Amino acid sequence: MRMRFFATTAMTVCLATAGGQAYAEELTLLVDNSPDTVAIAEALTAAYTQSNPDVTFTVEARPGGSEGDNIVKTRLTTGEMTDVFLYNSGSLLQALRPSRTLEPLNDLPNIGNVMESFTSTVSDDDGNIYGVPVQAAMGGGILYHIPTYEELGLEIPKTWDAFMANNAIIAEKTDKAPIIQTYRETWTSQLFVLADYYNVQMAEPDFAEKYTANEAKYADTPAAKKGFERLQAAYESGYFNEDFGAATYNDGLRMVATGEGVHYPMLTFAIAAIQQNHPEQLKDVGFFAQPGDNADENGLTVWMPAAYYVPKGGDHTDIALDFVNFVATPEACEIMTEAVGASGPYLIKGCTLPDDVPPSVADMLPYFEGDGRNAPALEFLSPVKGPGLEQITVEVGSGIRDADSAAELYDRDVEKQAKQLRLPNW
């Protein structure tokens, strides 16, 4: 017999039958163990089952980070992957060799709903699309304390010079830390470099392509090196919190939420943590993109969300594809918002956010309304990324290393990965 699946998909798939009775089908979905991703997986699968009662899901949770990467790669290699799985978009996806291991999604009825800025990060050179985004896009930029801005009459800076001028006023007129840094957790030190990529792309539109081809370097590309230079300038200004070397990520969130500090360079996934840890101060935290040199070219560096993928050779491929097709709908966005709240704009056309989103989320939306006001972070455009960046940026942010030597060191750091990936010209 043939059964119609989720109403929005307009797809039909065949189920095995016996004596006129459809077998109940149980699919498996592998996600990381983040509470948000588990909650979303459970909500989406429950909604799908509600419309397709013969299909149920088992959601499996794996560790994050490198341990989770190894699990995904091992299960794909051994043919033991679940029917659908969650994994990164961008350069990490390419390491899975998607043309060999994943089902292309180009023929899904709803694949046209997915914004091109995202599909470019889950596609191969032949134009095959492999993933549908789950959760919202993240911005890399500056979380800021709104009451301090209002008290001092500061305007949102659209250039780096204006940003540093605001810091000078904060340092002069308050006892707050103008810039929060939290190097006990070294990954937090990278934001001034990574979130500057929109400005790099505006100055050097083909930097990612040349960087991947080993034809451009951080050290010899002035626009690329500026991220290191801005981190050095921020340290030398004396604007950091005194305990920046020992402070943690959660310390940083507390400081920007309560106003102990005013600017915290960070990804916007931190909004959910502020909502959880400091709900009464959530309305006091805003967000803006890392400023560059030109106010007329102010824009946001975007981290693309992870995606659901369907492995080749599964036992329930047709149903898995139909489920992924359902995820590419505004209805699925509403389910995700209900499950975990609104943390940013979705990359599915037609999706909307509630009117009462936190200020930091609302501050992101203008960057997605105009053409050319956002760009993917470099790691979504190039597979070349070195493992040592966070140690290098800690050194720059602590005054141990200057920007010139940091850029040169990072250029050497990425060589090993590029050679492991067997990229041409490395």
Image: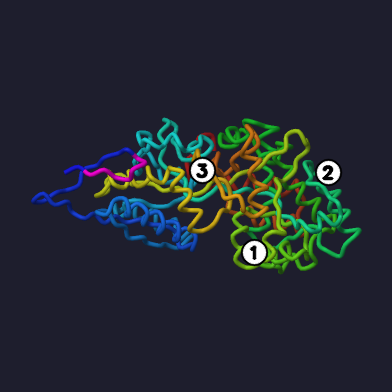
Pointer 2 with pointer 1, Cβ within 8 A = no
Identify which amino acid the numbered label 2 is placed on: Asp
Residue 425 lies, with reference to residue 177, above or below; the image says above
Neighbourhood count class around disc 1 (C-alpha, 10 Å): few under 14, some 14–19, many 20 upward:
some
Neighbourhood count class around disc 3 (C-alpha, 10 Å): few under 14, some 14–19, many 20 upward:
some
Pointer 3 with pointer 1, Cβ within 8 A = no
Q: The magenta stretch spans which residues? A: 3-9
User: What number is the disc on residue 79?
Assistant: none
Distance from disc 2 to disc 1, alpha carbons, whole Å, reads: 28 Å
| Precedes in sequence: disc 3 or disc 1 | 1
Q: Nearer the viewer, mark 2 or mark 1?
A: 2
Residue sitting at 86 percent across and 51 percent down?
153
Q: Nearer the viewer, mark 3 or mark 1?
A: 3
Q: Which residue is mark 2?
A: 161
Q: Position of residue 149 (x, y in %)?
A: 81, 54
Identify which amino acid the numbered label 1 is placed on: Glu
View extreme (right): residue: 172
Viewer-side residue, 66 vs 21: 21
Q: Which residue is mark 1?
A: 185
Distance from disc 3 to disc 1, alpha carbons, whole Å, reads: 34 Å
Viewer-side residue, 335 vs 122: 335
Distance from disc 2 to disc 3, alpha carbons, whole Å, reads: 36 Å
| Secondary element at tag 3 | loop
Q: Which residue is mark 3?
A: 351
Quadrant position of residue 177: bottom right
Q: Is residue 84 left or right of residue 336?
A: left
Residue sitting at 64 percent across and 63 percent down?
274
